[in-house]
């Protein structure tokens, strides 16, 4: 059974366009530089987005149950992805092709509006993350993460959390020990 966002009944009429798949932990769904041909809806599990910076992977986002994920710039424009999409935990995903996704947007004004609102909320989140990297100390970024996303700290390996915060695993350990 397809579990869809917000139990919006309109999604159910398009459920046949999604393909369910079970994916092992640490599976690359899309590599940086490849063209994204699918978007994913997470029924179960956790996914991270990361990019290569001079041989070092930099994690910049996590997604959990009930969230959709794709390399949106690649998925929409067929340009090479700027990042890699990888599972952290075993996942149950529902995938959809770009063509089928466009079909849904073209045939459901309610879903189109829901997607636009989702993208707007993501833009606000990205702005906050960007500004936090500029003005907040690593300690402040960690405390904000702890306050806003406690489940992240329970499910994500510490080296990914450190990368997400823009610090080393050793620095993260020091920050956590101060608490």
Image (cartoon, rainbow, N blue to C red):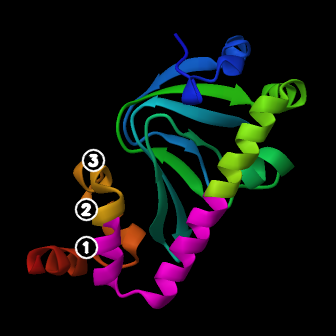
Judging by the rendered image, the residue that carries numbered circle 2 is 158
Residue denoted by label 1: 169
- Range shown magenta: 122-145
The one nearer the camera, 88 or 3, is 3
Q: Residue at x 28, y 82 (%)?
A: 139
- Where does the image place residue 118, in percent across and percent down from the top left? 66, 47
Left or right of residue 116: residue 8: left
Q: Secondary structure at mark 1?
A: helix
* Labelled disc at residue 52: none
Specify whether residue 3 is painted magenta. Answer: no
Circles 2, 1 touching at the beta carbon (< 8 Å): yes
Of the two numbered discs 1 and 3 on the same chain, state the one appearing first in sequence.
Answer: 3
In the displayed structure, would residue 74 be above or below residue 179? above
Q: Are marks 1 and 3 in contact (CB under 8 Å)?
A: no
Where, by quadrant of the figure, is residue 24 drawn? top left
Magenta region, mostly helix, strand or loop? helix
Which of 172 and 139 lies nearest the eye of the viewer? Answer: 139
Q: Secondary structure at mark 3?
A: helix
| Image vertical order of residue 124 relative to residue 140, above or below | above
Neighbour tally class for label 2: few under 14, some 14-19, many 20 plus, Cα within 10 Å:
some
How many other residues sit within 10 Å of disc 1, few (<14), some (14-19) or many (≥20)? some
**Most foreground residue, 84 or 156:** 156
Whether residue 71 is visible here, answered yes or no, is no
Which residue is tagged 3? Answer: 155
Q: Quadrant of residue 17?
A: top right
Which residue is at a point 64% across and 45% down the rendered structure image?
70
């Amino acid at each position: 059974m397809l579990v869809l966002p917000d139990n919006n009944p309109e999604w159910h009429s398009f459920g046949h366009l999604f393909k369910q798949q079970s994916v092992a932990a640490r599976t690359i769904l899309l590599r940086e530089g490849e063209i994204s041909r699918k978007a994913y809806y997470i029924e179960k599990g956790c996914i991270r987005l990361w990019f290569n910076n001079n041989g070092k992977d930099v994690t910049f986002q996590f997604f959990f149950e009930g969230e959709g994920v794709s390399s949106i710039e690649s998925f929409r424009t067929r340009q090479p992805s700027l990042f890699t999409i990888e599972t952290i935990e075993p996942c149950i995903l529902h995938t959809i092709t770009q063509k089928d996704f466009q079909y849904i947007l073209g045939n459901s004004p309610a879903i189109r509006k829901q997607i636009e609102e989702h993208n707007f909320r993501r833009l606000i989140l990205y702005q906050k993350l960007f500004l936090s990297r500029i003005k907040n100390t690593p300690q402040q970024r960690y405390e904000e993460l702890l306050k806003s996303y406690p489940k992240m700290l329970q499910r994500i390996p510490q080296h990914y959390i450190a990368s997400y915060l823009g610090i080393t695993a050793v620095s993260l350990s020091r920050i956590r020990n101060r608490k």
